[in-house]
Image: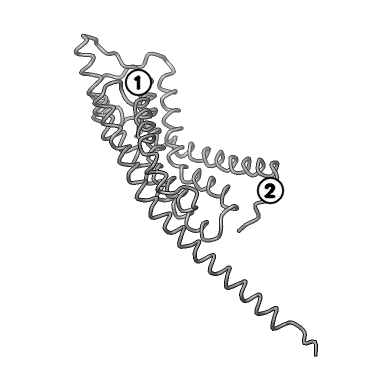
Amino acid sequence: MADKDLTIIEHIDEVRKRLMVIVVFFIVGAIGSFFLAKPLINFIQFDTPAEQVTLNAFNVVDPVVIYLKVIVFLAIVIISPVIMYQFWAFISPGLRDLERRVTLSYIPFAFLLFLAGISFSYFILLPYVMKFMINLSGQLNIEQTIGINEYFSFLFSLLLPFGFVFQLPIVILFLSRLGVLQPKVLVKIRKVAYFVLFVIAAFITPPDIVSHLFTSVPLFILYEISIVISRLGYRKFEKSERLRQMEEVKAEQQRQIDEVMNKPDDN
């Protein structure tokens, strides 16, 4: 295990270094996103969810604001593996060699889950949300005039949270693999977890029961998957702990044998 006896100043300095790396990569990602922003904006404008409404610019600077928002969004998505790696690199000195290798392998899966969360919210949830809003406006005899800036803000406020929420299985696996979290705890707090996820779903969906359930059910499924993954991760932790203890016992026995063999003969 690497040296963990770092002072608070050293920890703060390490955090600063990690953040500086993220900032540098974010700038690089933003530069690359500058060339990808226009195609993405055009795609979003004329894709199924947005084509149901007419998007308007209510401010002369709206096109610039939208462009910047898309650049930031793309940069976050592009450098998300870097952010994950920097987080891992910060905590890795406190892990054993095996734990470092195993947890490092989680980063690609975490990135895929991040993309899966964004894809779910855009291709599955967003069309339903837009349909609900349009139908509700029709029932209330309200003619919607939607600002393109507001639409993109709403879109990103829906996509990014789902990207983060879909990290739940990886976080659970990470904690279980380190022995911090036991699967029986997840089972014990299932009702509380469901309530928390239900509340989270309420914050990121329209205020109707159907869309609320439409969002909550996938989150509940994610939690159940996390329990299964936790069992697998915790079993591997227990196995590695048994092997470590056996190695320590063997090392201690060998040390005692060496002491006896190297003990000087009094005669």
Residue ID at (26%, 34%): 124
Q: Is residue 179 left or right of residue 15?
A: left
The location of residue 185, given as percent across then percent down, is 42, 44
> Vertically, is 262 above or below 120?
below
Tell which of 73 and 253 is nearer to you.
253
Q: Is residue 252 left or right of residue 192?
A: right
> Vertically, is 53 above or below 93?
above
Which of the 4 image quadrants contains residue 247? bottom right
Instruction: Please tell me whether mark 2 sits on a helix, a strand or a loop.
Output: loop
List the residue tagged with mark 1.
148
> Vertically, is 143 above or below 82?
above
Say what amino acid the circle numbered 2 marks. Answer: Leu
Residue ID at (36%, 31%): 195
> Vertically, is 239 above or below 204?
below
User: Which mark is drawn over residue 6?
Assistant: 2
The location of residue 129, given as percent across then percent down, is 27, 25
